Amino acid sequence: MGLLPVGQTGHRYEVHDDFGADGKVCIRATANGVRTSDDAGVAATDLPYEMATLHVYQGDETGVLSDHWACRDELEVMYQIGAPERPEPPKALPGAGANRQRAKPA
């Protein structure tokens, strides 16, 4: 989606874990902020968000950052800022347990 941190106020990360090996550094963090501007087709809602993130960084032989990989739960952020509304979970999946037989006690 690429919405973050554009359109946010007070965007910050709380680092929970960081470690490195084989020329890479891994950081597990929570991003926080408030949706304050209209961009990427999403209106400003002034609602706060919190997002789990995982980042892996790699430097080249001179120590300059050369690669970055990230995993961010941006869909959860969209729900938190009200665009779109979170769908209701299904009461039960169609056919779930329809032909299932219970195990008989021994």
Image (cartoon, rainbow, N blue to C red):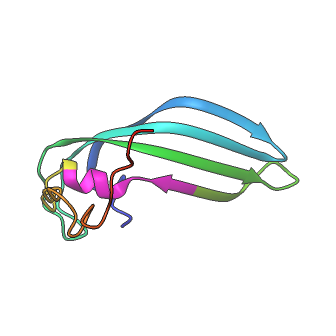
Left or right of residue 85: residue 3 = right
Which quadrant: the C terminus?
A: top left
User: Against 89, is 16 above or below?
Assistant: above
Instruction: Pick whichever, 49 or 99, lies toward us.
Output: 99
Q: Is residue 81 magenta?
A: no
Residue lying at 29% horizontally and 40% vertically, measured from the top left: 33
Magenta range is: 70-79
> Residue 40's x, y, as percent?
25, 69
Instruction: Pick whichever, 96 or 88, lies toward us.
Output: 96
Determine the image quadrant of residue 39: bottom left
Residue lying at 36% horizontally and 67% vertically, measured from the top left: 1
Left or right of residue 106: residue 9 = left
Determine the image quadrant of residue 86: bottom left
| Magenta stretch: dominant secondary structure | helix
> Residue 82's x, y, as percent?
13, 54
Residue lying at 38% horizontally and 46% vertically, measured from the top left: 104
> Residue 84's x, y, as percent?
15, 62
Residue lying at 58% horizontally and 48% vertically, measured from the top left: 55
User: Against 83, is 63 above or below?
Assistant: above
Left or right of residue 97: residue 47 = left
Left or right of residue 18: residue 91 = left
Q: Can residue 30 be spotted in the picture?
A: yes
> Residue 10's x, y, as percent?
30, 37
Instruction: Pick whichever, 20 or 7, lies toward us.
Output: 20
Q: Can residue 11 be spotted in the picture?
A: no
User: Against 77, is 9 above or below?
Assistant: above
